[in-house]
Image (tube, rainbow, N blue to C red):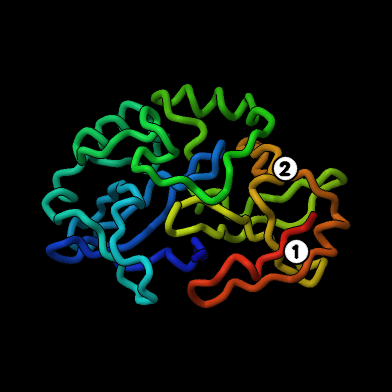
C-alpha cells in the first residue's frame, strides 16, 4: 500500500514501553529515492530533542490510526546519538547511529536498506546533481549531499523541458519498501491548481541551489495528465496514472 508523506507528519510514535513523540520529517536518498530516516520530535517527553530512526523499525504501519509502533524502547531513544537538523547528515553520524542500534548499514549490505527490503521502484539513473549545491553542502561537516528532507523539498518548482510549471507539494511512499513512488505536483493557480503525480524515473535532477526539480516532461504532458487527489489513508497503486 502507498501513503502520503504529508499525511504522516505529526503521527504519534510508540516504543515497546511507551510513547516517544511524533513524526516531524523524513530523509530520503535522491539517487534511488529510498526513505532512509524518520525524524522524531520527542517533545514533550524529551523537550526540544530530535532523533533519527530507520523506517524499518515500524511495527504496525498497516493500521489507519494516528500512532505508529516502533520496535525500540524509550531507553534506546533517550540514549541515542544527538541529531542536529540544521546540519547535513554525515556518514560518521550515520555510522554512529547504526552501530548504536545494531542495524546493518545500508551502504555496506546488499539491497537498498541492509534489511533485505527492496523498494518497488527501481533505482533511477539520472544526471549528476547540481555541482555547486553538492560542493556547498559537502563542505559542511562532510554531510551526504544526497540525503534530503521531504519537508525541505516541499515547494520546489517543477522545471519541464519547455519551462517551469507548478511545485512539489507531497511524496507518495510505499510503506513496506519505503521507496518514494511518486511526487505530487500542483501545477499552480494559473492552471486552476491542478494536482498530478510524477514518477521519480521522470526526475532528471534536483537543484538545491535553485530550489527546482527538473523533469523529462513537457508542460503539455503535465497539463494533459489526469488530476490526482491524495486519498485519506492507504490506497492501491493501480489508481495512479503519471504523465507519459
Q: Is residue 127 left or right of residue 84?
A: right
Foreground pick, 177 / 76: 177
- Label 2 packing within 10 angstroms: few (<14), some (14-19), many (20+): many
Residue at point 61%, 56% (across, down): 182
Q: Position of residue 197 (x, y in %)?
A: 68, 60
- What residue is shown at x 15% (from left), y 55% (from top)? 73
Residue indicated by mark 2: 214
Disc 2, SS: strand
Q: Residues within 10 Å of mark 1 (few under 14, many from 20)?
A: some
- Where residue 88 is drawn, which disc sits there? none
Q: Which image quarter holds the C terminus?
A: bottom right
Residue at which label 1 appears: 188
N-term mark: 1 or 2: 1
> In the image, is 102 to the left or to the right of 203?
left
Q: Position of residue 176 (x, y in %)?
A: 42, 57
User: Is 241 placed left or right of 48 in the picture?
Assistant: right
Q: Nearer the viewer, mark 1 or mark 2?
A: 2
Relative to residue 48, is residue 130 depicted above or below?
above
Amino acid at each position: 500500500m502507498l501513503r502520503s508523506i504529508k499525511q504522516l507528519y505529526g503521527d504519534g510514535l510508540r516504543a515497546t514501553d511507551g510513547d516517544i513523540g511524533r513524526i516531524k520529517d523524513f530523509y530520503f536518498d535522491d539517487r534511488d529515492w529510498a526513505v532512509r530516516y524518520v525524524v522524531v520530535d520527542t517533545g514533550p517527553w524529551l523537550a526540544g530533542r530530535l532523533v533519527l530512526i530507520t523506517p524499518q523499525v515500524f511495527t504496525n504501519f498497516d493500521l489507519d490510526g494516528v500512532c505508529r509502533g516502533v520496535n525500540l524502547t524509550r531507553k534506546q531513544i533517550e540514549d541515542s546519538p544527538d541529531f542536529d537538523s540544521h546540519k547535513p547528515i554525515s556518514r560518521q553520524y550515520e555510522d554512529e547511529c547504526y552501530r548504536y542500534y545494531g542495524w546493518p548499514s545500508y551502504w555496506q549490505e546488499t539491497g537498498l536498506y541492509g534489511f533485505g527490503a527492496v523498494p518497488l521502484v527501481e533505482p533511477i539513473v539520472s544526471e549528476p546533481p547540481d555541482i555547486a549545491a553538492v560542493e556547498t553542502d559537502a563542505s559542511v561537516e562532510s554531510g551526504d549531499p544526497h540525503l534530503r528532507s521531504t519537508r525541505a523539498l516541499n515547494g520546489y518548482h517543477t522545471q519541464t523541458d519547455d519551462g517551469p510549471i507548478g511545485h512539489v507539494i507531497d511524496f507518495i511512499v510505499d510503506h513496506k519498501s519505503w521507496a518514494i513512488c511518486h511526487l505530487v505536483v500542483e501545477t499552480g493557480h494559473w492552471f486552476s491548481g491542478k494536482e498530478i503525480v510524477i514518477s521519480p524515473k521522470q526526475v532528471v535532477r534536483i537543484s538545491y541551489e535553485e530550489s527546482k526539480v527538473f523533469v523529462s516532461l513537457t508542460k503539455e504532458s503535465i497539463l494533459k495528465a489526469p488530476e490526482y487527489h491524495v486519498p485519506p489513508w492507504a490506497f492501491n497503486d493501480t489508481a495512479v496514472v503519471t504523465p507519459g
